[in-house]
Image (cartoon, rainbow, N blue to C red):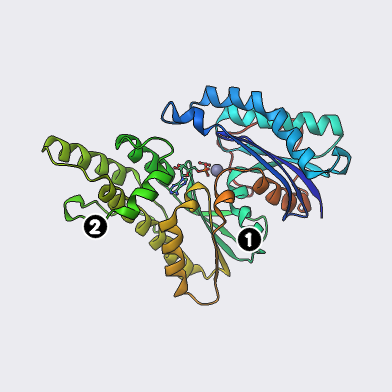
Amino acid sequence: MALILAIESSCDETACALIRDGNTILSNIVSSQINTHTLYGGVVPEVASRIHVENISTVVSEAVKEAGVTMDEVDAIAYTQGPGLIGSLHVGVMAAKTLAFTFHKPLIPIHHITGHIYANAFVKELKFPLLALVVSGGHTELVWMENDYSFQVIGTTVDDAIGEAYDKVARVLGLGYPGGPVIDKLAKEGKPNPDYHLPTPKTDEPYNFSFSGLKTAVLQLNDRLKRQGKEVIPEDLAYCFQETALQSLTAKTIAAVKEKHPAMVVVAGGVAANSRLRELMNEKMKAIPDCDLIIPPLKYCTDNAAMIGAVGEVAYRHQAFGTFEDAADPGLSMPGE
Ligand code: KG4
Ligand code: ZN
């Protein structure tokens, strides 16, 4: 049982949270830079680090103030060590080290994706063995957890992450950044269109994913239709892209569930906010007995520090402490991997 101050700054959200006993959120401050990056059509790393530097102190002070605690009461400082953008990560790492040094607290380096997985602990106590479908702008992974704080990546994307494919397709269709929410909304108005046939993603390994071919097929189809002077129906194109991507994603996840028999399945990461993915997972999991499904509420799907605090508390119990020598690591592997 511990009070954790958690910091997250791996991409374009500057965030700090105070979490008691792993699942009581005393405060959860997220300062999003999305309005700035939207102007450029994607996250600009240098701009992201500069805004993190400008905001981090205010975000941390606000989180401590809102939690109504003193730094004396805090047991440890958890922070995202990686993966992510090096400059962005560095700001959070320095803030965490400064707090740890000033207030004599242990440091807990956290892998960002483990945070997304443990965001589900705010919904329900996690049960093991657990299968996590991690879907974000940088990751598409199936993670097997035999026990608490044990991670084994059993499947991954061989090219693009699913969120990346959503963002690129949206950019080419002129729908802005981030692409996921817009495509999600447009697809609801779309329908199957026989002219928009797209290839089903194929990979050698059963649990690996691939979205680059699908993304390119959408872009080529869009170009061809334009060249032929045909009207592109964005709703139908969004629908066909999303259905193809999500049917492949969920089919592989369900195949893993049937083979490995987890006690619980969780969906994690920014793309877990997708309404069709939530619907498909709920539908497909109904047919599987004795296995719970958790998909976090929207506010815990995208980047936040509460999730870093949730896994931080587990790491604290496992005494997974870091040192002042630890540096930001954009290619960090999961603990035990
Ligand atoms: O986890 P996250 O906030 O940041 C990373 O760690 O990458 O995920 C961001 C990704 C973006 O690619 C965004 O387009 C996608 O999540 N996303 C969605 C939706 N909301 C956000 N993708 C599909 N449908 C959504 N509703
Ligand atoms: Zn994330």
- Position in image of residue 18 (x %, y %): 75, 45
Question: Given the current orientation, which residue lies at the most extreme right position?
Answer: 72
Name the N-terminal-most of marks 1 and 2: 1
Question: Given the current orientation, which residue lies at the most extreme bottom position?
Answer: 289
- Position in image of residue 55 (x %, y %): 66, 27
Which label belongs to residue 57?
A: none
Does any atom of ligand 1 lie closer than 8 Å to the CB of label 1? Answer: no
Q: Is residue 150 above or below residue 104?
A: below
Residue toward you, 292 or 66: 66
Q: Secondary structure at mark 2?
A: loop
User: Does residue 86 appear to the left or right of 157 in the view shown?
Assistant: right
- Position in image of residue 279 (x %, y %): 43, 63
- Position in image of residue 151 (x %, y %): 60, 54
Query: Callout 1, which amino acid?
Result: Val
- Judge the density around disc 1: few (<14), some (14-19), many (≥20) Cα neighbours within 10 Å: some
Q: Which residue is mark 2?
A: 192
Query: Callout 2, which amino acid?
Result: Pro
The quadrant of the image that shows the N terminus is: bottom right
- Judge the density around disc 2: few (<14), some (14-19), many (≥20) Cα neighbours within 10 Å: some
Q: Is residue 161 visible?
A: no
Q: Secondary structure at mark 1?
A: loop
Residue occupying the point 71% across, 29% down? 58
Residue toward you, 204 or 185: 185
Q: CA distance from mark 1 to mark 2?
A: 34 Å
Image quadrant of residue 32? top right
Q: Which residue is mark 1?
A: 123
Residue occupying the point 49% across, 52% down? 273
User: Does residue 243 appear to the left or right of 306 in the view shown?
Assistant: left
